[in-house]
Amino acid sequence: MPRLAPLPAPQFNLRQTLESGQVFHWLDDGAGGYRGLIGARPVRVRQQGGELWVTPGAEAAAARYFALDHDLEAIYASFPTDPAMTDALAFCRGLRIIRQPLWECVATFLTSSMKQVAHIRQMSLALRRRFGRPTRGGEDPAVYPAPEILARATEADLRACGLGFRAKNLLQTARLVAEGAVDLEAIRTMDDAAALAELCRLPGVGPKIANCALLFAYERLGAFPIDVWIERVLRQLYFKGKRNVTARRLQEFAARTFGPYGGYAQQYLFHHARKARAWNAACSSTDLMRPQERFSQ
DNA sequence: GGCCAGGTGGAAA
DNA sequence: TTTCCACATGGC
């Protein structure tokens, strides 16, 4: 185990943060920590109590990446206090919305449609292995390939990484970004609505994936991606028995109900709902319930 | 073997 | 406007 350097990280849960489905390339190092990259920099991380131990020299990068400056007390104080949110908060406390590199986040979530978190990890790691610069002799994840690199790939190359029908979209999106037709950096200065619209110009990027990028890369903590899990939770909690609840209504309701830190609330509800199901499945052989059954009555 | 997964885009009603 | 459907792949 290489020597690591400590930095203060109160109110932080590394495991919940890295395993909540917001980032997909970190690997368990078998010693209670993780190995991965912050951008192009290989980093090892391990948490011990209120300290985060990281590769020496990477302290500042890690503090920024893991958003240790986010005021979690203020964020928690903004949450609704209904039972589901309370449960999710108790389960996820210390989970932080991290600051991911723009392209890496956009591209990874582009490949996420109709895929389970485990599959998104597989695709991300396969793309890194196939196209990215290796680190530590190929033992650790490779650097996520830049748009210029993927733009030169073929659709067949990308399909070989398990992308399926997403291959064409990733290729076209990589080309648009590589040639500057869509400027991911310039989106930083746009307001939320304009940023969302600009991201949706990328093929394969719709409102859900654009909101993921806004939340996990652009620091828009109010962005509220609505996927199948969150839709289920919202319908069960707030629209029980009601029909004709459109996606638009759900989106408006979320913005109104969860406020400026809605993205945090969303991530806590998402992670808790997924892990609760996994826990149910693992611990009960006679009471297996699929998600839609758990929430349908 | 059927079902589902951090959806999107285009056609049809 | 809303509704429907194809789109690949892999785990359970």
Image (cartoon, coloured by chain):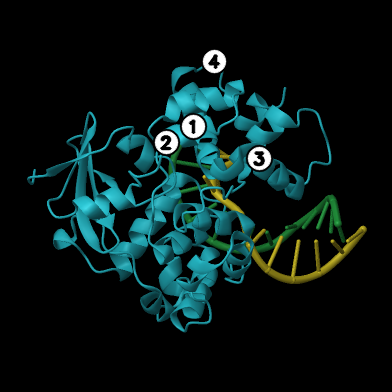
Chain colours: A cyan, B yellow, C green
Task: State yes or no: discs 2 and 4 in contact (Cβ < 8 Å).
Answer: no
Q: Quadrant of residue A296?
A: top right
In front of the other: A169 or A218: A218
Residue at image location 14% in from the left, 55% down from the top? A57
Quadrant of the drawing holding the C terminus of chain A: top right
Q: Amino acid at mark 4?
A: Thr
The verdict on a common chain for dots 3 and 2 is yes
The image shows residue A29 at horizontal and vertical percentages of: 20, 42
The image shows residue A230 at horizontal and vertical percentages of: 61, 39
In front of the other: A136 or A270: A270
Relative vertical location of residue A164 with respect to residue A62 in this rendering, above or below: below
Question: Circle 2 marks a residue in which chain?
Answer: A
Residue at image location 24% in from the left, 69% down from the top? A133
Task: State yes or no: discs 3 and 2 in contact (Cβ < 8 Å).
Answer: no
In front of the other: A79 or A44: A79
Q: Element type at marker 3?
A: helix
Q: Amino acid at mark 2?
A: Leu
**Which numbered disc, 1 or 4, marks the residue closer to the eye?**
1
Taking A3 as reference, is A131 left or right?
right
Q: Which residue is most to the bottom?
A: A179
Mark drawn on residue A72: 2
The residue indicated by pointer 4 is A286
